[in-house]
Amino acid sequence: MTTKKNKLPFTEKQIITVLTKNYSIITPEIEKIIDQILIHKQGREIIINQIIKRFNLKNNNNQIIDGLIYQKIIEINDSEIIQKLIQEIPHGIINSNKFKNINYQMLQHLLINKKFEEADKLTQKCLCEIVELTTNNKKNWLYFTDVQFIPKEDLFILDLLWKIYSKGKFGFSIQKKIWINNNQKWDKLWEKIYWLKKGIMKRYPQEFMWTIDAPEGHLPLFNQLRGTQTLYYLFNNIDW
């Protein structure tokens, strides 16, 4: 028997309304609502049916809330619902068909599982590999002159992967937004995204934060010891 205590506190219509809003960032209040829904088996079934339906749409615009839900479902103790998720969406919310030049599936896997330090290293490696495809030159890091060889579709996917699996907190476009909001002052950007410690760039990797609790824009990292030109050119390529 369903008691008042374990009754789903939202109707199906209310749940769908929550899921269909286009969030730029997931607030603690929204995450709390998702948690309240996922506690209940009926709520889990409604949610998973909705994200599977959205995933299969031809013109699917990936939603940040779907990434959060994907992460939460694989962490819960419900083998039946996890099996359904993996069967229908085996590799993550972002369909690998969108990966044109490089396979970013390993990066998606790392981000789903919140292995942000490993994901950060792989992101830098992917950027170098993209440039290598065009220039046939082995790259260990990017110069500003290399940015011209990074297709916007690849930069968009890398940015989207970070945003989708960080509740909208991480990504190059998030960093650009903060930079713009601070009059394009680099020192202000470093301060806002907590890359500085007492006015000095933090030591890599031990002084950076590798969890979802890191400040907005904190990840992915970019080596500023070689100056700001590379990141400047990267920001200029972001128009979404």
Image (spheres, helix red, strand yellow):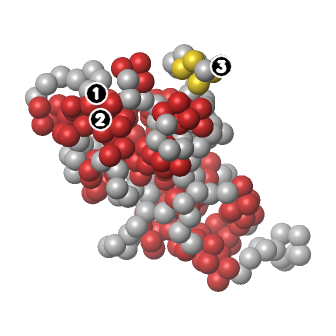
Label 2, label 3: how far apart the Cα atoms are: 30 Å
Q: Is residue 29 left or right of residue 130?
A: right
Label 1 sits on what residue type? Leu
Residue that numbered label 2 is attached to: 127
Q: Are marks 2 and 1 in contact (CB under 8 Å)?
A: yes
Nearer the observer, disc 1 or disc 3?
3
| Element on which disc 3 rests | loop
Nearer the observer, disc 2 or disc 1?
1
Q: Which residue is drawn at 36% across and 44% down?
A: 235
Residue that numbered label 3 is attached to: 198
Label 1, label 3: how far apart the Cα atoms are: 27 Å
- Location of the N terminus by quadrant is bottom right
Q: Quadrant of residue 2?
A: bottom right
Label 3 sits on what residue type? Lys
Q: In this view, does 100 lie to the left or right of 19?
A: left
| Element on which disc 2 rests | helix
Q: Is residue 83 visible?
A: no
- Location of the C terminus by quadrant is bottom left
Residue that numbered label 1 is attached to: 142
Label 2 sits on what residue type? Leu
Which x, y percent locates residue 26? 62, 57
Checking the image for residue 120, the label placed there is none
Which x, y percent locates residue 128? 26, 30
Q: Are marks 1 and 3 in contact (CB under 8 Å)?
A: no
Mark 2 residue crowding within 10 angstroms, few (<14) / some (14–19) / many (20+): many
| Element on which disc 1 rests | loop
Q: In this view, does 131 lie to the left or right of 75?
A: left
Which x, y percent locates residue 140? 27, 21
Q: Which residue is drawn at 33% across and 31% down?
A: 229
Q: Quadrant of residue 120?
A: top left
150 relative to 206, above or below: below
